């Protein structure tokens, strides 16, 4: 390989590491034609560099899995990162994020001895108690394939076993991966439903990767998609205001938690509270209300009252009064 080409490849590599250039920028920096840039990029890939091309923005970036630039961390920053990584990778067991633990060990090893000792001592006195999670034991290959499809903007053909409808096949355009409510979900456009759906990774029974490219719609964000959903499933129709009265027994428990960004709590003279919130869909919030049993009374709307009433009727059948 000539000295000129080596110099050009180093220049190309430096440009990729310091920004997200398009092909025109690379041509200008290296003073070559597009064809030469593509050829040089191919050489870098064959040398083991992972180069990603964003089809939407038409820009390149280099993914380096082994090098972390020097960081000037404060004690609080180091403690927060290492504690979270240890908990996520070693105790919380969020599926497919086990590498967090090894990352924490490496980061701790890079700290100055005095700071490392302090982090270890304080970290041992802190613990995050997680909610139970779905281990998704048999779904790792599915998760990796969906993540790869999202990264490269390639559609996947899947079979899906829904709990509320017959098993179906569809072509998915993955937009986001979301860990919520103890498990992983993919937010994707389904060709069968002609709409964006929230699908549980563990319920995908078969997956085939395709070469079909797609683009995420301009302006798509999780905030716009979720709207004011109580948790993660927005429903069709206008948002609705829900008012729930909680007894004094649970009033403090409810009021001290930010359950939803649109909530408002009003205290009553008898120690009870009225919980006000505007949501995009009523089913999810009805399950939350049911969790408080007789200590919660829905004041509005009638739609939520009816959902609760139906559950109470069915419960009464299972627990008849003798």
Image (cartoon, grey):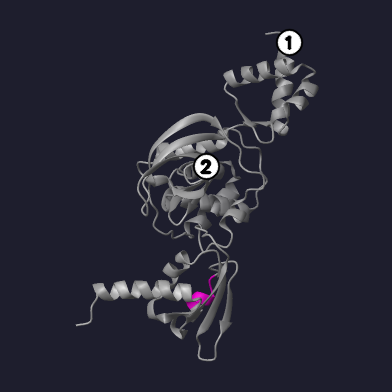
- Give the structural element (helix, strand or loop) at label 2: helix
Residue bounds of the magenta highlight: 253-257
Magenta stretch prevailing secondary structure: helix
Residue that numbered label 2 is attached to: 103
In this figure, which residue is indicated by the disc labeled 1? 3
Is residue 31 placed above or below 1 in the rendered structure? Answer: below
Identify the residue at horizontal 71%, vertical 16% (top origin).
35
Question: Are there few (<14), some (14-19), or many (20+) residues within 10 Å of tag 2?
Answer: some
Label ID, residue 119: none
Q: Between tags 1 and 2, which lies in front? A: 1
Q: Position of residue 182 (x, y in %)?
A: 43, 55
Query: Is residue 81 shown left or right of residue 131?
Result: right
Q: Quadrant of the N terminus?
A: top right
Mark 2 and mark 1 in contact (Cβ < 8 Å)?
no
Residue at point 47%, 43% (across, down) = 192
> For residue 151: magenta?
no
Residue 60 percent coordinates (x, y) = 67, 30
């Amino acid at each position: 390989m000539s000295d000129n080409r080596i110099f050009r490849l180093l220049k190309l590599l430096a440009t990729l590491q310091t920004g997200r250039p398009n092909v025109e920028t690379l041509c200008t920096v290296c003073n070559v034609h597009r064809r030469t840039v593509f050829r040089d990029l191919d050489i870098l890939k064959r040398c083991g560099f992972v180069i990603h091309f964003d089809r939407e923005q038409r820009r390149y970036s280099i993914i380096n899995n082994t090098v972390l630039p020097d960081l000037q961390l404060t004690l609080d920053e180091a403690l927060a990162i290492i504690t979270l990584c240890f908990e996520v990778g070693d105790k919380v067991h969020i599926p497919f994020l086990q590498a967090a633990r090894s990352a924490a060990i490496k980061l701790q090893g890079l700290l100055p001895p005095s700071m490392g000792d302090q982090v270890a001592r304080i970290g041992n006195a802190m613990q995050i108690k997680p909610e139970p999670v779905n281990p998704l034991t048999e779904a790792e290959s599915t998760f990796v394939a969906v993540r790869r499809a999202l990264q490269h903007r390639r559609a996947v053909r899947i079979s899906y076993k829904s709990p509320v409808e017959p098993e179906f096949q569809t072509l998915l355009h993955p937009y986001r991966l979301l860990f919520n409510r103890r498990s992983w979900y993919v937010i994707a456009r389904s060709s069968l439903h002609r709409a964006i759906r929230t699908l549980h990774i563990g319920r995908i029974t078969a997956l085939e990767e395709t070469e079909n490219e797609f683009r995420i719609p301009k302006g798509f964000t999780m905030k716009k998609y979720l709207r004011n959903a109580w948790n993660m499933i927005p429903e069709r129709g206008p948002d609705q205001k829900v008012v729930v009265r909680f007894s004094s027994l649970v009033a403090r428990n409810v009021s001290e938690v930010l359950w939803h960004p649109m909530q408002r709590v009003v205290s009553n003279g008898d120690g009870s509270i009225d919980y006000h919130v505007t949501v995009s869909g009523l089913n999810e919030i009805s399950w939350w209300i049911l969790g408080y049993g007789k200590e919660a009374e829905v004041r509005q709307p009638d739609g939520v009252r009816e959902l609760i009433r139906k559950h109470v009727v069915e419960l009464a059948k299972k627990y008849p009064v003798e």
